[in-house]
């Protein structure tokens, strides 16, 4: 059985001693922001998913981790920032048991109480839905210059529960938008910007438009004003893949919440054959639009109602470096003058990176291995065993959601090759990732991998699957492993941030050229390339072999780690991401 997991992400901001926001604005040459953003007119960030278990909310993947990191970076930089999201009263946990020859994947549901996580009840707000008046609780938690504001009620359900075009999802989205907007007003806050982290948060911008238009502003002026102050951040590639809602659903859940007849008319006109995609209206209501990596912003295929292709500004995701990096490495990078106190690349960082030695890397990683082993002490593998990875062994890791395009099964396509690499280099392989509840196809693919491992004594000793992937495992694996594998089908990863955590922790990255990885040239890391899957497999195993050999050779290790860091440090810095948003928005 899986033990109760305590998410132990330490508060680890060893450099942070920033006095006030002016200091940060000066550092990024944006003094004028003191006028644009203030405590009463904060930057507002809307997200249906937040992955921040320390603050009580478990997400599903990268979208939520990004939201949590964006808020953390704002807090460290002292930027006035309010994150609005639902508080889900229930969350899922994944378990694995072996029954005979079969591995059974099942999910349990756990109640979550916001009081335990330090939220205060503020008030209730009311929305309408399906002919009923629904009262929502507004709760909040202050964190430095930032605040998390949540709306919740006992029947709110879980993240992504129900079908994606279903009534319950629409209810959740409407509740966040209209309820959250009222919550801001209750607190006396007017957003300086509304950032919509994907289209599920469209209703926040709609609530603002409705407020302006029903309070005497001319309708077209209201549209112009709302458009100018709304940023739509897109994480998806294909518009057609998005779920649709029907006019009937809007009549039941959306229109009753609108006060302005003009807004209702405007929204009604956006339906085609009685159906609507939220991206269509989000594009209409947000003049500012961003994609999450250079490649993604270029290839995201979206059109507005007039049929024009939508342009997205590329703002590559970053990570909050101190959250995801071992304290030892953060201190090391700062002492070497590689990062500054804002966790931005320091001036002359490329020359400073040259000073890193293989000895330093090995020592820092040995401490990271201890941290990982401490976590593995309470996170069992697929057999219910607790691992300890030996200090002198090389560790490969793959940790990401189990979705098909990420191809978690790829390295198991030729079990004998994998076995040879692991044996030859005294290496281990940890595989980690949750299967979405109800995804039978991926569940079967995972089971197949586990059976391959089970049937080979070498693989059984050296390959371990850890269920219920979460922040704790994500962080520990980045810190304690030597090599990470990232092999999405090229063209399908919007950005990905898991690989950034691996680079920040001085690991070697073996990856296809996709998402944010493709922000830098393919020779910046150990690149998997091939015309087809067979050729990619040849390349994958060759790169794994190269990575393991590099860890046995000081010269190669130093060379590869330095190259990665020089190329990607500016990309992975979450503070760089916040700076890019501020540059674009103000
Ligand atoms: C970092 C992280 C992610 C992000 O994963 P990508 O696949 O790289 O987008 C998802 N889940 C958890 C638990 C993480 O820590």
Image: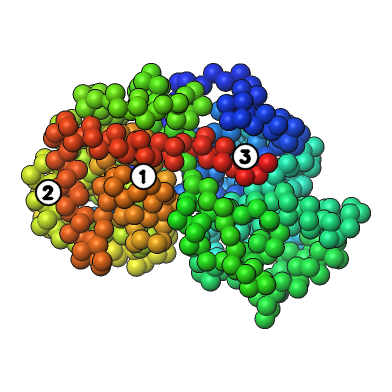
Question: Looking at the image, is 573 positioned above or below residue 454?
Answer: above
Q: Which residue corresponds to the image point at 15% horizontal and 47% vertical from the top-left? A: 545
The quadrant in which residue 559 appears is top left
Q: Which mark is residue 499?
A: 1
Q: Which residue corresponds to the image point at 37% horizontal and 30% vertical from the top-left? A: 350
Q: Using the rendered image of the protein, determine whether residue 142 is visible from the camera's viewpoint.
A: no
Density class for disc 1 (Cα within 10 Å; few <14, some 14-19, many ≥20) is: many
From the image, tell me which residue sits under label 3. 582
Q: Which SS class for mark 3? A: helix
N-terminal label among 2 and 1: 2
Total marks placed: 3
From the image, tell me which residue sits under label 2. 421
Q: Which SS class for mark 1? A: helix
Residue 60, percent from left and from top: 47, 51
Residue 382, percent from left and from top: 25, 49
Residue furthest bottom as drawn: 273
> Residues under labels 1 and 3: Cα distance?
25 Å
> Residues under labels 2 and 1: Cα distance?
22 Å
């Amino acid at each position: 059985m899986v033990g109760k997991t305590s998410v132990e992400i330490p508060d680890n901001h060893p450099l942070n001693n920033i006095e006030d926001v002016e200091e940060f604005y000066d550092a990024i040459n944006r003094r004028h922001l003191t006028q644009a953003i203030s405590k009463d007119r904060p930057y507002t960030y809307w997200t249906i998913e937040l992955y921040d278990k320390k603050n009580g909310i478990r997400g599903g993947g990268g979208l939520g981790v990004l939201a949590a990191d964006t808020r953390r970076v704002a807090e460290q930089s002292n930027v006035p920032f309010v994150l609005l999201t639902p508080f889900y009263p229930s969350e899922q946990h994944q378990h694995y048991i072996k029954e005979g020859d079969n591995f059974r994947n099942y999910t349990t549901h756990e109640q979550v109480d916001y009081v335990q996580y330090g939220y205060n009840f503020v008030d209730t707000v009311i929305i309408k839905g399906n002919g009923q008046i629904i009262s929502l609780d507004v709760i909040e938690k202050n964190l430095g210059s930032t605040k998390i504001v949540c709306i919740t009620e006992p029947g709110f359900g879980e993240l992504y529960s129900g079908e994606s075009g279903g009534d319950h999802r629409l209810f959740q989205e409407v509740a966040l938008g209209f309820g959250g907007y009222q919550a801001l007003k209750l607190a006396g806050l007017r957003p300086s910007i509304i950032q919509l982290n994907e289209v599920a948060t469209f209703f926040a911008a709609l609530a603002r438009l409705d407020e302006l238009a029903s309070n005497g502003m001319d309708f077209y002026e209201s549209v112009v004003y709302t458009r100018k102050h709304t940023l739509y951040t897109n994480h998806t590639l294909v518009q057609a893949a998005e779920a649709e809602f029907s006019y009937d659903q809007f009549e039941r859940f959306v229109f009753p919440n609108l006060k302005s007849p003009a807004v209702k008319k405007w929204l009604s006109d956006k339906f085609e054959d009685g159906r609507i995609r939220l991206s269509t209206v989000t594009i209409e209501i947000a003049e500012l639009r961003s994609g999450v990596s250079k490649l993604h912003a270029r290839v995201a295929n979206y059109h507005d109602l007039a049929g024009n292709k939508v342009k997205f500004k590329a703002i590559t995701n970053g990570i909050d470096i101190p959250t995801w990096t071992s304290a030892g490495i953060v201190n090391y990078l700062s002492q070497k003058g590689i990062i500054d106190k804002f966790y931005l690349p320091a001036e002359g960082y490329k020359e400073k990176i040259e000073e890193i030695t293989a000895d330093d890397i090995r020592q820092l990683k040995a401490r990271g291995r201890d941290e990982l082993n401490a976590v593995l002490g309470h996170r069992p593998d697929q057999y219910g065993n607790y691992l300890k990875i030996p200090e002198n062994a090389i560790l490969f890791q793959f940790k990401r959601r189990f979705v098909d395009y990420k191809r978690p099964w790829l390295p198991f396509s030729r079990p004998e090759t994998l076995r040879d690499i692991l044996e030859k280099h005294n290496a281990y392989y940890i595989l980690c990732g949750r299967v979405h509840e109800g995804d039978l196809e991926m569940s079967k693919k995972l089971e197949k991998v586990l059976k391959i491992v089970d049937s080979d004594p070498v693989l059984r000793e050296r390959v371990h699957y850890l269920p219920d992937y979460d922040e704790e495992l994500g962080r520990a694996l980045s810190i304690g492993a030597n090599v990470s594998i990232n092999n999405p089908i090229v063209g399908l990863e919007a950005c990905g941030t898991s690989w950034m955590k691996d680079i920040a922790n001085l690991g070697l990255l073996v990856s296809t050229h996709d998402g944010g990885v493709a922000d830098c040239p393919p020779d910046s890391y150990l690149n998997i390339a091939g015309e087809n899957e067979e050729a990619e497999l040849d390349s994958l195993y060759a790169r794994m072999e190269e990575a393991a050999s590099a860890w046995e050779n000081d010269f190669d290790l130093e060379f590869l780690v330095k190259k990665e860091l020089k190329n990607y440090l500016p990309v992975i810095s979450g503070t760089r991401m916040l700076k890019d948003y501020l540059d674009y928005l103000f």
